[in-house]
């Protein structure tokens, strides 16, 4: 294995999905169906896993609540019941076999207590070990504008810059309060950014004062797109936050540890050529259902 080859992806799916209550009382948001570009009805998590595998990732670690493990295993590890399998079209039977192969690349990791996104990432530490890894949000799916998928684009940039990379998208000021935001200095205009600050869910006033990026409109900022290529050093900073009980809004978040990682090793931002679909809110989920299939 080459020193910096990225082999592993981590997908945390252990949150409660409160913004999609009451549906999430019975269905995990990462299992909500979407219609993919191949026309299949897939649980969101499956489209995310396929994005990772098609980018060349060999192993996927999925962080689950202990009680949810069985349902994810049912989807990703167990074949369908014989009676169902027999009734499937030949194409879907073939897809079902392919799913079993996909399942062999998946490991379940447990988050015993729901202490936040950053804490969920920390739960993957022992599985990731000392390798760079791709981190993917459990409620976002991606459509590339170019031949190369969004995750592949990120892997390419990582190879080029040889430090952690966060994927970015241009975001209007009105939705900054929902996202992790960055600022920095362009290395390649409108594409590759040396990140100089990361800030979780800023107010518009804070963003206007501190997060403006040269050449961008007054009311547009760069926010994280849901994909990260991270050095394993991130676990040291997450451990520090957890040991010192440094919580934000009651939870251990990722962004503050990312900012520590930036100070220590540097972080590159990459404006992805593509679109990110958020399925974690009622209206963005609805929009994903409409737009994703034909994007
Ligand atoms: P979100 O910020 O979307 O949180 O998590 P959430 O709890 O799932 O949803 P809301 O905000 O209550 O509606 C981002 C990702 O991190 C996972 C989620 O499953 C999601 O994929 N996560 C979050 C965990 O795995 N564990 C946590 O404790 C929190």
Image: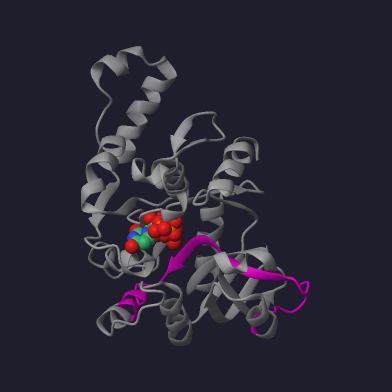
Residue 4 visible in the current orientation = yes
Q: Nearer the viewer, residue 48 or 56?
A: 48
Residue 236 on image: x %, y %:
31, 80
At horizontal 30% and vertical 83% (from top left) the residue drawn is 240
Residue 1 on image: x %, y %:
33, 61
In the rendered structure, does residue 229 fall within the stretch colored magenta?
yes
Quarter of the rendering containing residue 173: bottom right
Residue 135 visible in the current orientation = no
In the rendered structure, does residue 144 fall within the stretch colored magenta?
no
- Would you place residue 205 above or below residue 276 in this image? below
The quarter of the image that holds ligand 1 is bottom left
Q: Nearer the viewer, residue 1 or 37?
A: 37
At horizontal 34% and vertical 72% (from top left) the residue drawn is 232
- Would you place residue 31 above or below residue 82 in this image? below
Residue 235 on image: x %, y %:
32, 74
Residue 106 on image: x %, y %:
29, 47
Quarter of the rendering containing residue 63: bottom left
At horizontal 54% and vertical 78% (from top left) the residue drawn is 198
Q: Which residues are magenta?
A: 210-238
Q: Nearer the viewer, residue 104 or 248?
A: 248
């Amino acid at each position: 294995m080459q020193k910096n080859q990225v082999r592993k992806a981590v997908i945390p799916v252990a949150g409660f999905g409160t913004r999609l209550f009451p549906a999430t009382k019975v269905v995990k948001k990462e299992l909500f169906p979407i219609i993919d570009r191949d026309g299949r009805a897939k649980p969101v998590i499956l489209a995310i896993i396929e994005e990772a595998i098609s980018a060349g990732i060999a192993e996927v670690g999925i962080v689950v609540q202990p009680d949810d493990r069985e349902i994810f295993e049912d989807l990703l590890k167990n074949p369908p019941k014989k009676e169902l399998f027999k009734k499937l079209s030949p194409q879907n039977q073939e897809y079902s076999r392919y799913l079993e192969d996909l399942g062999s690349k998946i490991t379940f990791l447990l988050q015993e207590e729901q202490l936040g996104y950053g804490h969920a990432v920390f739960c993957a530490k022992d599985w990731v070990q000392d390798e760079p890894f791709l981190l993917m949000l459990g409620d976002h799916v991606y459509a590339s504008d170019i031949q190369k998928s969004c995750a592949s684009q990120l892997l390419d940039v990582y190879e080029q810059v040889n430090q952690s990379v966060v994927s970015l998208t241009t975001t209007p000021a009105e939705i900054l309060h929902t996202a992790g935001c960055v600022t920095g200095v362009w290395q390649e205009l409108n594409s590759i950014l040396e990140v100089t600050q990361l800030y979780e869910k800023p107010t518009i006033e804070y963003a206007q004062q501190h997060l403006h990026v040269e050449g961008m409109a007054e009311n547009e900022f760069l926010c994280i797109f849901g994909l990260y290529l991270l050095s394993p050093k991130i676990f040291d900073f997450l451990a520090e936050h957890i040991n010192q009980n440094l919580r934000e809004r009651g939870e251990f978040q990722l962004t503050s540890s990312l900012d520590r990682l930036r100070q220590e090793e540097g972080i590159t931002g990459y404006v992805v050529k593509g679109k990110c679909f958020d399925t974690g809110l009622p209206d963005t989920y609805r929009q994903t259902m409409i737009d994703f299939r034909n994007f």
